[in-house]
Amino acid sequence: MELTDFLGLLHPAIAVIFVFPLIGTVVNFAWQTRQRRLQILAANKSKIPLVVGAEHKQLGEWLTSAVVGLTLIGLSYPIGKNIIKNNLWNKAPFQVVFILLMFAATIASLVFLYQARQRLWRGVFATLSGAGLVIIGCQDGVYRASSEWYWSHYYIGITAALLMIFSLAIVQDIYQDKSNRWRTVHVILNCIALLLFIGQGMTGTRDLLEIPLSWQEPYIYQCDFAKRTCPTPDSQVRK
């Protein structure tokens, strides 16, 4: 394996080592938090400690940062590879600068989202963070598999990241809303996000099988993916 292949493994390695265990922990605390709330509402004494709610909130915020960061790492690899391969720094320097600024703006917007307290600013920074991810994902080099969007690692991942950003943006509303409508929205959206994360585990594994090593690319990309055929050594010799 060459350096470029190892860099390509950063995204799945971080997902397996850090993000997916964090997802399991957040789900566990979410379940305990809900069970404790239901027990208190039923006028029963709960054995679940009060601290689970605060820990769920804190770990949920960490999860949002981890998911957005992991998404940016996953997007930076193919985009950077495309920039180097096509020498865009010399051919289209403004495009490269724009991409770098979008990465910086997305990270900055997420940081400001954590600091924002007023609903207006939370909405602004959440929108900017989500828009940044979408714009970066539209750059050349990113494999989107738009023809199979419903089973695309890219589209599932972007959707999950957007749900995480939205969940972070409504945290304050959950605690202020006595009708629990925002809490219900939070639960529903994060259940959907959990299913998307499961889909990410499956599609990510599939994509790792499909992505060739750098030294294999010249041969692999001669294949006809629609017909699922590859040139044989004999046909290459005749050419």
Image (tube, rainbow, N blue to C red):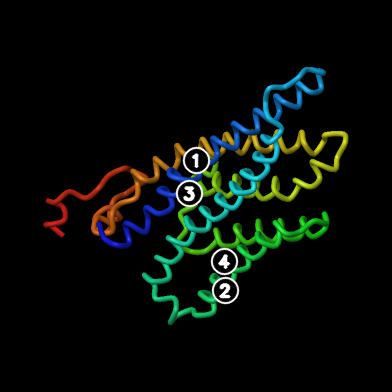
Image location of residue 158, percent across then percent down: 58, 50
**Residue beneath the point at 67% across and 63% down:** 109
The local secondary structure at tag 2 comes to: helix
Among the two numbered marks 3 and 1 on one chain, the one whose residue lies closer to the N terminus: 1
Q: Quadrant of residue 24?
A: top right
Pick whichever, 152 or 58, lies toward us: 58
Single out the mark in the foreground, 3 or 2. 2
Give the left or right position of residue 167, taking residue 43 as reference. left
Pick whichever, 153 or 101, lies toward us: 101
Among the two numbered marks 4 and 2 on one chain, the one whose residue lies closer to the N terminus: 2
Among the two numbered marks 2 and 1 on one chain, the one whose residue lies closer to the N terminus: 1
Q: Quadrant of residue 51?
A: top right
Among the two numbered marks 3 and 2 on one chain, the one whose residue lies closer to the N terminus: 2
**CA–CA distance in space, label 4 to label 3:** 22 Å
Rendered view: 62 above or below 33: below
Among the two numbered marks 4 and 1 on one chain, the one whose residue lies closer to the N terminus: 1
**CA–CA distance in space, label 2 to label 1:** 31 Å
| Residue corresponding to mark 4 | 103
Mark 4–mark 2 CB contact (< 8 Å) = no
Mark 3–mark 1 CB contact (< 8 Å) = no
Q: Which kind of residue does numbered mark 3 sit on?
A: Ala
Image location of residue 10, percent across then percent down: 40, 54
Counting other residues with Cα less than 10 Å from the Cα at mark 3, is it few (<14), some (14-19), or many (20 or more)? few
Label for residue 140? none
Q: Which kind of residue does numbered mark 4 sit on?
A: Phe
**Residue beneath the point at 49% across and 40% down:** 20
Mark 4–mark 1 CB contact (< 8 Å) = no
| Residue corresponding to mark 3 | 145
**CA–CA distance in space, label 4 to label 1:** 23 Å
| Residue corresponding to mark 1 | 20
Single out the mark in the foreground, 4 or 1. 1
**Residue beneath the point at 64% across and 49% down:** 162
